Amino acid sequence: MKSISFQTYLLWGLVIFGFVSVGKVSIDNINGFACPSLFGVPVCYIVTLAYGLMLMSLMISHNGCKHHFFCIAWGIAFTVALFASLAEVFGAGGVCPSTNGGLRVGESQGVPLCYISLVMLIVILVLFIKGLYQIACDLHNKC
């Protein structure tokens, strides 16, 4: 039996950290802190759902389902993080919640969480492809 690699532990850790972090932003939104909305749904709820689906996909033992759910969830979270980061850079700012809580109003109010999420999602994808996806491909090619 193959042992679990450091990459897999790191992947699990980042997905759990992302889920807990965006879950906290969602709870803050319920308590009155602003979270931008998309079609009337707060974006932080959509991203929480996406990270939750990524986490659930890591628990699924069927490799086909694992990869489909992971890729769909990752794509949703990445799209939101990418467009929010672009809006933060090229827009007026204040699009993303910040590390200090709530939406940023000025430059001194923390790092936008969409930047952190974007970087984390890129690392998560690399870890997934190099780890669990590669293992599944190797198993499939053995047959």
Image (spheres, rainbow, N blue to C red):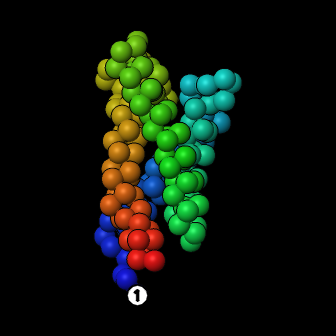
Q: In which quarter of the image is residue 65?
A: bottom right
Q: Which residue is drawn at 41% across and 66% down?
A: 137
125 vs 28, left or right, is left
Q: Does 18 sit above or below residue 111?
A: below
Q: Residue at x 40, y 12 (%)?
A: 92
x%, y% of residue 102?
Answer: 49, 29
Can residue 142 be seen here? The reply is yes
Q: Quadrant of residue 115?
A: top left
Which of the image's four quarters has the N terminus?
bottom left
Q: Which residue is drawn at 39% across and 58% down?
A: 128
Tally of numbered tags? 1
Which of the image's four quarters has the C terminus?
bottom left
Q: Does 77 sit above or below residue 16?
A: above
Q: Residue at x 37, y 83 (%)?
A: 2
- Residue at the disc numbered 1: 1
x%, y% of residue 10?
Answer: 35, 63
